[in-house]
Image (spheres, grey):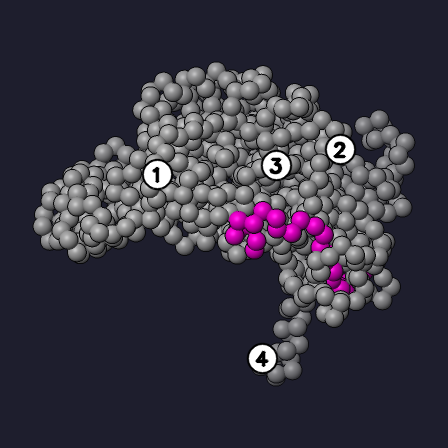
């Protein structure tokens, strides 16, 4: 049979309609990102806005958007801390039997939200998502104005009240419009997915998952609140719902399904539970095998699917032995981690998903297998990436340096913790919830508040431990309130380099934790890629001179020191990327913390990056260090390289063979006292690997009259640091 053009078009339209209907049946919840066509004005005098006019000072912008970074990254700590208004006109054609919600993935740091001049509510805190139902406020002509007042003014009730990073303002993560059925999984419960997949017990033979849901009824219909359930032999009226959960493997096969009939009551949000058992599960093995299932929870009214939430989960277990370290799925798993902030050069916090893709790719290229999210809740998209790539995640509450006893601060901090846990609980990569970082006991007693947070965290999630990071031993019992403890120590930077040669230096820290095991939650050294020295000594952290070569020396010694102690169950480099800290004046730059292994713009990997890559990754590495030190003022120099190839590395200088060396246990090769000639010197390292020649090379210019950037330092003494801010 042949079809004419009109018949073909009709068939295609029918096919497209059927596909759309099938898609709607499969995914009855509609989520639309509404990041484009926003307007912004930076002033305090606006109320809400029903017409965005450029003549009134409104700018056309897209979300994500933030302010303050332009000045902060230049070292101006007096960047704008005030109010900005956002507004957007959106067409919504409400359907019968549907509900509508706005979800904001983050606003810094206080947001007041309106639609059509109707006040929806406030959210306090810079880093977590929040949502509001807008169904009853939608306009009759389908044209709606969303208005958001955002302020990043310092507030006494919002953590962090201090810290070595900048608090920008703005709607810096995505905004969503969500359409659901009248009866649905709750959207407004701390902007959570409305379901928890709690991995109660996971082994290679069996996994047990306790599923907790919240079902919200937005209708006037349902079982009366006083009605007794079916188990007491009462007759259930019409309108019964079915709750169904299923686990689907990576090939699309349903592994197991559980379901139960449930009741619903008008305008109530009711919790319901299911229990699921999986035989012989395919385990999530971190970066080795980050296997993910699709975890699907569905709500049916009779045979009609009315709501569905679909997430990815990896089945895994972990524990820490205080003497032997971290175990993933009952196997030793040394955590080689990094920390990172969420800002980027010339973007502040308004980063894109592509930016986060690049960040995670760099972390994995280096071979790290864990991420500490410093010092606050990071985006859901980043957590998805960690699930997919196998990075274990330390998720952090923004309680940094100081704590307050006033009821408002305590209440806001509790809400921040609830945001953190409920929004992220199904991310399998997260292995711990952090309660604080470098908290100092000054005028406020932290113990009651921290005990309250500990109880709250364990009640919300009994499957994961809590953790804290400290730089001091003040209030030692405070450090034992969380389950785990990390130490922020900087030997070779704020502390003497000699500490790294002391085999007992870490022993004093082990008993400070609740169970005796510790991690090193921060360590590192600054490095300006324009500062170089052939034989550096330990620099002043707050000084001008931060040679890249010293950063490498400090990291080389640190890794060797940590690996001697099996009770150090993990380490987290501070920091993966340079980041802006407006009040810093050091390293030849203003407003910069230069401890990153990669530059702020992500364009240059520092030498220390390749040291870790050689030690942690499976990718072949042959790397000649100090390639940016192009002009030398000393005739005699060391030449250092990193290699994980397991072969002898050959060195030639100006075509002259200077011999071959094998890398040591930490992938380091160093030729000492190499003599340079005046003028150009070609340095080449090479080896044969898999029958191919691999090499790295550079040309150095030896000029004895060259004046280094290093200032004359007549003051040789340095102040002993405490491993904290470094100021």
Query: Does the magenta run of residues contain 192?
Result: no
Q: Secondary structure at mark 2?
A: helix
The residue pinned by badge 2 equals 408
Give the residue at x 35% y 32%: 716
Circle 1/circle 4 CB separation < 8 Å: no
Left or right of 238, for residue 504: left
Q: Which mark is residue 713?
A: 1
Left or right of 104, for residue 676: left
> Residue 309: image x %, image y %?
66, 46
Q: Which mark is residue 162?
A: 3
Q: CA distance from mark 1 to mark 4?
A: 91 Å
> Residue 100: image x %, image y %?
77, 54
> Residue 235: image x %, image y %?
87, 34
Sequence-first disc among 1 and 2: 2
Residue 687 visible in this rendered orientation of the protein: no
Circle 3/circle 2 CB separation < 8 Å: no
Closer mark to the observer between disc 4 and disc 3: 3
- Choose between 333 and 56: the one closer to the eye: 56
The residue pinned by badge 4 equals 1
Sequence-first disc among 4 and 2: 4
Q: CA distance from mark 3 to mark 2?
A: 17 Å
Q: Which mark is residue 209?
A: none
């Amino acid at each position: 049979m042949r079809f004419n053009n009109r018949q073909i078009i009709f068939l295609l339209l029918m096919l497209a309609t059927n596909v759309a209907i099938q898609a709607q049946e499969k995914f009855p919840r509609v989520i639309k990102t509404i990041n484009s066509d926003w307007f912004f004005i930076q002033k305090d005098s606006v109320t809400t806005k029903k017409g965005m006019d450029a003549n009134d000072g409104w700018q056309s912008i897209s979300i994500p958007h933030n302010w303050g970074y332009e000045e902060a990254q230049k070292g101006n700590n007096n960047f704008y801390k005030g109010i900005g208004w956002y507004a957007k006109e959106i067409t919504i054609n409400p359907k019968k039997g549907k509900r509508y919600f706005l979800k904001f993935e983050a606003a810094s740091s206080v947001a007041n939200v309106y639609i059509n001049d109707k006040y929806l509510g406030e959210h306090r805190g810079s880093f977590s998502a929040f949502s509001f139902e807008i169904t009853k406020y939608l306009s009759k002509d389908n044209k709606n104005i969303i208005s958001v007042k955002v302020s990043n003014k310092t507030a006494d009730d919002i953590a962090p009240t201090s810290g070595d990073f900048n608090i920008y303002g703005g709607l810096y993560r995505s905004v969503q419009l969500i359409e659901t059925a009248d009866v649905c999984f709750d959207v407004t419960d701390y902007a959570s997915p409305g379901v928890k997949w709690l991995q109660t017990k996971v082994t290679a033979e069996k996994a047990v998952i306790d599923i907790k849901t919240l079902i919200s009824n937005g209708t006037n219909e349902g079982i009366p609140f006083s009605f007794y359930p079916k188990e007491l032999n009462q007759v259930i009226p019409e309108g019964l719902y079915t709750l169904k959960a299923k686990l689907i493997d990576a090939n699309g096969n349903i592994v197991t399904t559980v379901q139960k009939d449930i009741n619903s009551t008008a305008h109530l949000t009711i919790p319901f539970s299911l229990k699921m058992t999986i035989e012989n599960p395919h385990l999530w093995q971190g970066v080795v095998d980050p296997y993910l299932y699709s975890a699907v929870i569905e709500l049916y009214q009779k045979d009609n699917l009315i709501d569905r939430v679909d997430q990815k989960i990896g089945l895994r277990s972990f524990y820490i032995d205080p003497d032997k370290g971290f175990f993933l799925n009952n196997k030793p798993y040394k955590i080689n981690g990094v920390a990172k902030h969420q800002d980027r050069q010339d973007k502040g916090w308004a980063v894109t998903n592509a930016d986060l893709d690049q960040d995670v790719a760099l972390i994995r290229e280096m071979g790290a297998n864990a991420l500490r999210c410093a010092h606050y809740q990071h985006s859901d998209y980043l957590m998805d990436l960690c699930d997919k790539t196998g990075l274990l995640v330390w998720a952090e509450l923004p309680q940094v340096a100081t704590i307050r006893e006033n009821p408002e601060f305590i209440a806001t901090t509790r809400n921040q913790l609830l945001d953190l846990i409920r929004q992220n609980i199904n991310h399998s990569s997260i292995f711990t919830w952090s309660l604080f970082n470098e908290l100092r006991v000054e005028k406020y007693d932290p113990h009651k508040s921290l005990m309250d947070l500990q109880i709250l965290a364990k009640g919300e999630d009994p499957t994961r431990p809590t953790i804290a990071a400290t730089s001091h031993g003040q209030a030692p019992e405070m450090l034992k309130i969380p389950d785990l403890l990390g130490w922020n120590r900087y030997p070779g930077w704020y502390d003497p380099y000699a500490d790294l040669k002391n085999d007992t230096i870490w022993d004093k820290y082990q008993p400070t934790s609740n169970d005796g095991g510790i991690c090193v939650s921060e360590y590192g050294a600054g490095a300006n890629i324009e500062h170089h020295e052939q034989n550096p000594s330990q620099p002043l952290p707050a000084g001008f001179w931060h040679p890249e070569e010293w950063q490498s020396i400090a990291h080389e010694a640190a890794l060797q020191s940590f690996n001697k102690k099996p009770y150090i169950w993990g380490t987290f480099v501070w920091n993966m990327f340079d980041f802006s800290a407006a009040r810093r004046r050091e390293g030849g730059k203003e407003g910069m913390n230069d401890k990153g292994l990669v530059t702020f713009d992500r364009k240059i990997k520092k030498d220390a990056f390749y040291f870790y890559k050689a030690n942690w990754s499976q990718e072949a590495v042959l790397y000649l260090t100090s390639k940016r030190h192009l002009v030398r003022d000393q005739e005699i120099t060391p030449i250092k390289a990193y290699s994980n190839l397991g072969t002898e590395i050959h060195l030639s200088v100006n075509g002259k063979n200077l011999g071959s060396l094998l890398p040591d246990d930490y992938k380091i090769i160093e030729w000492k006292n190499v003599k340079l000639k005046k003028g150009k010197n070609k340095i080449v390292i090479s080896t044969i690997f898999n029958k191919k020649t691999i090499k790295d090379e550079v040309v150095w210019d030896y000029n004895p009259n060259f004046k280094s950037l290093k200032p004359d330092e007549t003051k040789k003494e340095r102040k002993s640091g405490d491993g904290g801010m470094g100021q």
